[in-house]
Each structure stands twice: as structure tokens, then as C-alpha cells.
Image (cartoon, helix red, strand yellow):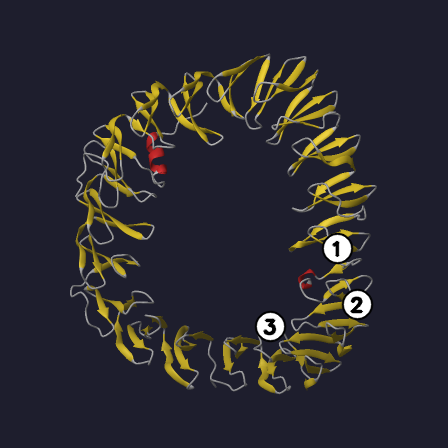
């Protein structure tokens, strides 16, 4: 039985959709008005649902009916509910009374009396059912056929109608014609949303909602859904049926599985063959297994034995065959590492360009390959040319160079294999090194070489890092920083460095307190020496606030001139884009400009700042003596400090504020104008952008739009 949602809930949730008419409350009754508040349908109803397809469900007393947009009665007021349904996109009206259902069309014609426990659409027709009986009606409500049996079942989810008794089950089409029947069945079970399975003598027949019998012989042992098909088992073999009852694959296979959106794999004599979705063969029965490849939808792998062939997602050959392993990440490159007994490289046509003679091959960013043979490493180009002979104990690529180890020597080679530099220090981790610089280690200590093998950062640090192309050497808590050419920037250590738009932020620790400074890398001089607890940029980084050692605040500009001396207990900019700031004194907050000119003469208690509102760049919610007001960035009071509540509401790109005064609530718009006077018990903004208002006299709810127009005769329409 359908349950009718409350009219008020429907009204709230439907307001997001633009409609010609909306419910209008006049006194204690509802009518319908246009969006300008003009009454169009008289207020004669106790409840009113929104219009849908030109029809609205309305209630008088305890009974529901339906009207059109002119107020004409479509469904008389005789029912416990009225709700909309659709038959092939044509709207229909379900009605209910005494737990029974009936049906009207939107012209007001009664199609079915309110006599059925089940009413549903069946093709172009209608079905009404009670226990032991279903009647098929035409779309105009004319009776086509009445079906009576021990059970008459309309499977609404599958849209399948059948009659059954202990001797027979018969299936009927939407015209009531029997298109399939079987005697002495043992069970009827749904199969997905489109089929039912009739079992008889351990054999199964599948009936679809397209009024078709899948496999007319009906002699299969098992059935299951496989994506968009029905998979059937017949004489121990599997086949694949489409919804028209035709075989996509005949029941000749040991196993069938879907590979991807293009391919099906079917197994015969222990080998898989590939088929497209129409059942056309894409390969012979060549493969022990066919699988997707993790990380790509463009290819699949088909195993011939231990090795496999690479196929496209549609089953076409790539020419890459008989491989044990493949670097899928390199598949879009011309050189693809592969493994048979050993590793080699082939192109996308399957032509071998590096013979499989290596124990390992690594792809490189430069497009070459690091190869390993007899525990020695070298480099081979994509054309198969040897760039670096296999004589190194270890080899890695770093930027424009290869770093190799030859016994106790550590070699720097360019991409052509020419030696650039040497060192006796071991290579360290290169992950954090700037471009074409290399980390080396001597025992536990680390330093940095350039491409010529020269030490540019001494080998004395526990750890290395980089920041903005510079090198940071770390000893315990101490950090030293170097330019890329190895020149040390500061002799003294600091605890941290941070690159900002204002310069290099330097952090110093003294007596367990962290201080900050700013250094000009371009001119090699201090902007601000590290004696400030905080440095915070604002106004597009043209100014920044400073917190001194004794916790007072000031402001400097990007010329690092002190504009506001650090004498304030609390001072902060409104945002990163503002040239205004707030300072705090014993008297309260003052709104200031950068030149320390007061924007608003009187101190106030700042409650919160609302950023990005339509009232200005900022709105200040201010308070005195537990009352609230609103002030803009020019110091103008938008609302005097006389409200018990001011709460921000936002809808789309507009801003509205709920206000409270003398225990009542109202609303102001984004210009500061009072849209709804604070005279109501409760008010809130809906997701649709309208307001609900609960009036204090009679506790009824009304709708008011953002212009203050109200769908009620009780509300002031100023």
C-alpha cells in the first residue's frame, strides 16, 4: 500500500523546482497563487500538494482529490490519498480507499474502480489484481481479459504475469494471450529484474518480460545472470542467451566469462577462445587463461602456457607474444621491456630491438634502458646501441646523468656514456637533491657533489634536504643552507627555513621560543632579523603583521619598513586581501587603516567577521551589553546594536541574515534592508531559497520569498 507523504513535507522539498502555481495559505485554507502572490485557485483546501504534470492533489476534510491548474476537479474528494504515477511517460493518478487501489487519467476519467490490492502498468495496458484474480485493462480502462486461478501473479519488478495451479502454470502477454504454459512444474523463481525461471523435472525454462521463452526446448540444468545475458547449462555445457531467446553462444562450453566491455571468453577442451558481444569469434581456442591487466583498460593478456600474448581490449593481436612479464607502464613507448627466459625489449609491433639476454632491464626517464648481465650494469639505447658497457656494480639515473659504481670508484656519466667526474665517496639517496647535484656519503655523514665530482657541500651532515633549489644540511636540530653553487648563505645554524613570497623565512630558537626573520636572497641581506614570534602576510602580500618578543603586534610593508609599531596586545588583518586591520585595547576593538586612521571611532566587542558577504568585503558582528549589531568596513552601522540575535544564512550567491529582537525573529537581505520584520516566533531559510515563517498568533507556517512577498494574508507585504 502506498503511503502519502505529508503536504507540508512535499511543499518544502518541491520548492527547488520552478512551478507556475504554488500553494497559497489564506486564513486556515490553501489555494494556489502565481509567483507574484496573485490568487489563481480559490483557497478551499485543508492541504495542497504542488502541481505535477498540470495536476495537484488537494485535501478537503479527511478526503483527498485532485484539481487542474484552473481549479477544476479531476478526482472527486472520495479517497484516502491521490498520487501521481507514469505509464510510458503518460501521467496517471493512483487513488486509495480502504486499503484498495483505483486509477484515473489526468482528464478525470475513472479507469479502474477502487477495488484492487495491486494496480500496475503492463506494457501499454493496466493490471488490477486481488487474490486469485487479475484483470487486464486497456489504457482507457476497458476490460480486455479476466484471469481467475488458484493464484494469479503479476511480478511487478519483472513485469511478468502468470497464472498457476497444482497442474499448470501459464504466462500471458499484455493483451492476455497465453504465450507459454507448462504442466507439473516444481517451482517458479525470479531471475534478476527481467526473468523468471520455471523448474520442472529438474529442468528449467526461462521466461523474459519481452514475452519470450529463452531456449524453447527448455531442457537446461542451471541458469544464472552474466551481465546483460542469461547463462544456461545444458548437458553439462554452458551457453549464453540474449533477452530475445537467441543464443549468443551455444551451450558448448565448459566455462564462460565476461572479460571487458568488448569481449567474452568461452572455454572448450581446456582452452579459452574470445568472442565479441554478438558472438563472433575473435580468436581460436588458444589460451589457458585470459585476464584484464591491472592499471590499463586498453589491453588484456591471454596465456598460451606460462607466457602470454598481449592483446588489445577488443581482442586484436599487438604482435607482442610469448612473454612472461611486461612493463605495462612503458606500453605507450616504443621500447617495451619483456621477459621470456631473460629480459629484452621489443617495439609495439612485437619486433625485438634488444635481445632477451639480460637478467633485468629498467626503463629510464631519458628513454634508454639500464640492463643487467652477469651481475654487472650498463645502458642500452632504444635502438639497441650500447651507451655504457655492462661493467658497473651498480648504476642509477639522476637528471642528465648516470651514477655508477666500479669497485671502490663512484663515477658520474652523461647520457652518452662519457665520464664526467669521479669520487671515492659512496652514493647516498638522491631523492631530495637539486637538479644535476648528487648526494654522497662517508660513513654516516653526507655531502653534495656537482657533475664534475667537486664537493660543493662538505660531507659532514647527518641528513640532506632541499628548498626552492637550495641545499639544506642538517646536524641534529641545526640546519645550514647553501645556494646551488655550494656557497653557504649563513654561517650560523637555524632550526628551519621556509620560502615565501616575501623572501626566505628563517627560524631561530632561543630559550625554547621560536623566532622568525626574513632574508632577501637577491640582495643577500636581512629584511627582518629573526627576532619576531610571527610574521604573517596580508593584502596580497603587500603588508605583514609582526608579533614581537614580548607579544605585542605591529605592521610592516614589503619594503620592510615598520608602519605600525608593535605596541598592541592584539592586532590582525581582516584577510589576506584587506588593507584594514583590527587592534585590541582595554576598551575593546578598533577598526584601523594601515596609516592607523580609525575607521569607526567607538570601540566595540568583536563577535565574528563574515567574509565575502554582499554587504561589503566584510561584515563585523559586534556586541555591547549582550546585544548585537552589524558594521561594514567603512564603520557604518548596518544594524544598530539592539538585536538579541544576528545569524548568517547563505543561499547560492546571496546572503541573508536572521535577526532576533524582543524574542521574535525576522530577516534582512544582502543590502541590509529588513525583508521580514522581527515579529515572528520562528523563521528559517529553505534550500530552495524561500523562507518558512511561523507566526506567533496562530502558529501557522507561511512562505515568504526574498523580496518579502508572502503567500499569506497574515503577513505584511512591504
Along the line of sight, which residue is nearer the eye, 427 or 171?
A: 171
Residue 156 drawn at (x, y percent):
54, 25
Count neighbours of disc 3 (C-alpha within 10 A) and say few if under 14, some if 14 to 19, many if 20 or more: few
Count neighbours of disc 1 (C-alpha within 10 A) and say few if under 14, some if 14 to 19, many if 20 or more: some
* Disc 1 to disc 3, C-alpha distance: 40 Å
Along the line of sight, which residue is nearer the eye, 176 or 307?
A: 176
Picture quadrant of residue 625: bottom left
Residue 418 drawn at (x, y percent):
71, 84
Residue 676 drawn at (x, y percent):
20, 44
As helix, strand or loop, the secondary structure at mark 1 comes to: loop
Q: Between tags 1 and 3, which lies in front?
A: 1
For residue 675, above or below residue 124: below
Left or right of residue 711, residue 497 in this image:
right
Are discs 1 and 2 less than 8 Å apart at CB? no
For residue 129, above or below residue 427: above
Q: Mark 3 = which residue?
A: 431
Residue occupying image coordinates x 19% and y 72%: 597
* Disc 1 to disc 2, C-alpha distance: 27 Å
Q: Mark 2 = which residue?
A: 359
* Residue 423 appears in the figure: no
Q: Mark 1 = which residue?
A: 317
Residue occupying image coordinates x 70% and y 32%: 246
Count neighbours of disc 2 (C-alpha within 10 A) and say few if under 14, some if 14 to 19, many if 20 or more: some
Amino acid at each position: 500500500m502506498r503511503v502519502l507523504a505529508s503536504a507540508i513535507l512535499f511543499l518544502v522539498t518541491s520548492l527547488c523546482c520552478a512551478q507556475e502555481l504554488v500553494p497559497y495559505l489564506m486564513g486556515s485554507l490553501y489555494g494556489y497563487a502565481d509567483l507574484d502572490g496573485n490568487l489563481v485557485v480559490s483557497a478551499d483546501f485543508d492541504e495542497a500538494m504542488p502541481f505535477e504534470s498540470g495536476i495537484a492533489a488537494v485535501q478537503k476534510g479527511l478526503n483527498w482529490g485532485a484539481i487542474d491548474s484552473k481549479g477544476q476537479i479531476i478526482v472527486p474528494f472520495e479517497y484516502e490519498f491521490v498520487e501521481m504515477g507514469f505509464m510510458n511517460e503518460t501521467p496517471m493518478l493512483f487513488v486509495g480507499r480502504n486499503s484498495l487501489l483505483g486509477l484515473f487519467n489526468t482528464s478525470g476519467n475513472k479507469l479502474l474502480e477502487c477495488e484492487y490490492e495491486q494496480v500496475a502498468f503492463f506494457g501499454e495496458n493496466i493490471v488490477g489484481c486481488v487474490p486469485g484474480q487479475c484483470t487486464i485493462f486497456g489504457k482507457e480502462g476497458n476490460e480486455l481479459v479476466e484471469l481467475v486461478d488458484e493464484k494469479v501473479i503479476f511480478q511487478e519488478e519483472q513485469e511478468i504475469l502468470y497464472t498457476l495451479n497444482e497442474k499448470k502454470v501459464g504466462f500471458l502477454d499484455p493483451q492476455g494471450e497465453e504465450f507459454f504454459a507448462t504442466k507439473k512444474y516444481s517451482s517458479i523463481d525470479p531471475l534478476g529484474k527481467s526473468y523468471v525461471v520455471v523448474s520442472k523435472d529438474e529442468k528449467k525454462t526461462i521466461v523474459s518480460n519481452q514475452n519470450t521463452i529463452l531456449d524453447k526446448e527448455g531442457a537446461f540444468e542451471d541458469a544464472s545472470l552474466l551481465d546483460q545475458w542469461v547463462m544456461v547449462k545444458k548437458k553439462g555445457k554452458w551457453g549464453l542467451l540474449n533477452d530475445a531467446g537467441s543464443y549468443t553462444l551455444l551451450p558448448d562450453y565448459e566455462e564462460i566469462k565476461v572479460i571487458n566491455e568488448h569481449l567474452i571468453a568461452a572455454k572448450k577442451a581446456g582452452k579459452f577462445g574470445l568472442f565479441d558481444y554478438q558472438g563472433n569469434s575473435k580468436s581460436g581456442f588458444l589460451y589457458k587463461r585470459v585476464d584484464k591487466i591491472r592499471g590499463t583498460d586498453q589491453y588484456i593478456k591471454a596465456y598460451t602456457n606460462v607466457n602470454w600474448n598481449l592483446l588489445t581490449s577488443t581482442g586484436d593481436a599487438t604482435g607482442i607474444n610469448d612473454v612472461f612479464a611486461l612493463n605495462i607502464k612503458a606500453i605507450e613507448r616504443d621500447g617495451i621491456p619483456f621477459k621470456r627466459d631473460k629480459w629484452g625489449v621489443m617495439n609495439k609491433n612485437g619486433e625485438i630491438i634488444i635481445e632477451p639476454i639480460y637478467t633485468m632491464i629498467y626503463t629510464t626517464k631519458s628513454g634508454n634502458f639500464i640492463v643487467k648481465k652477469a651481475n654487472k650494469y650498463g645502458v642500452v639505447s632504444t635502438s639497441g646501441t650500447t651507451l655504457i658497457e655492462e661493467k658497473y656494480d651498480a648504476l642509477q639515473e639522476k637528471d642528465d646523468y648516470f651514477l655508477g659504481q666500479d669497485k671502490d670508484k663512484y663515477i658520474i656519466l652523461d647520457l652518452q656514456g662519457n665520464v664526467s667526474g669521479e669520487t671515492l665517496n659512496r652514493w647516498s639517496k638522491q631523492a631530495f637533491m637539486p637538479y644535476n647535484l648528487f648526494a654522497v656519503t662517508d660513513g654516516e655523514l653526507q655531502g653534495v657533489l656537482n657533475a664534475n665530482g667537486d664537493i660543493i657541500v662538505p660531507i659532514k651532515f647527518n641528513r640532506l634536504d632541499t628548498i626552492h633549489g637550495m641545499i639544506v644540511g642538517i646536524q641534529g636540530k641545526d640546519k645550514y643552507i647553501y645556494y646551488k653553487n655550494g656557497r653557504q648563505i649563513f654561517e650560523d645554524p637555524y632550526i628551519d627555513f621556509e620560502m615565501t613570497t616575501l623572501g626566505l623565512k628563517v627560524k631561530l630558537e632561543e630559550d625554547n621560543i621560536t623566532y622568525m626573520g626574513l632574508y632577501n636572497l637577491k640582495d643577500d641581506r636581512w629584511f627582518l632579523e629573526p627576532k619576531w614570534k610571527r610574521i604573517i602576510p596580508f593584502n596580497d602580500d603587500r603588508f605583514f603583521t609582526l608579533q614581537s618578543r614580548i607579544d605585542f603586534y605591529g605592521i610592516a610593508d614589503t619594503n620592510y619598513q615598520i608602519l605600525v609599531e608593535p605596541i598592541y596586545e592584539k592586532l590582525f588583518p581582516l584577510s589576506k586581501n584587506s588593507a584594514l586591520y583590527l587592534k585590541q585595547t582595554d576598551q575593546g576593538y578598533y577598526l584601523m587603516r594601515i596609516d592607523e586612521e580609525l575607521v569607526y571611532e567607538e570601540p566595540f566587542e568583536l563577535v565574528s567577521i563574515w567574509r565575502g558577504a554582499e554587504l561589503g568585503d566584510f561584515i563585523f558582528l559586534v556586541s555591547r551589553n549582550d546585544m548585537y549589531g552589524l558594521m561594514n568596513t567603512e564603520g557604518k552601522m548596518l544594524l544598530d546594536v539592539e538585536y538579541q540575535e544576528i545569524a548568517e544564512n547563505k543561499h547560492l550567491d546571496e546572503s541573508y541574515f536572521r535577526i532576533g529582537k524582543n524574542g521574535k525573529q525576522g530577516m534582512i537581505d544582502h543590502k541590509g534592508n529588513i525583508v521580514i520584520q522581527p515579529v515572528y516566533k520562528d523563521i528559517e531559510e529553505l534550500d530552495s531559497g524561500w523562507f518558512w515563517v511561523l507566526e506567533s498568533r496562530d502558529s501557522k507556517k507561511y512562505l515568504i520569498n526574498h523580496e518579502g512577498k508572502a503567500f499569506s494574508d497574515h503577513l505584511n507585504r512591504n
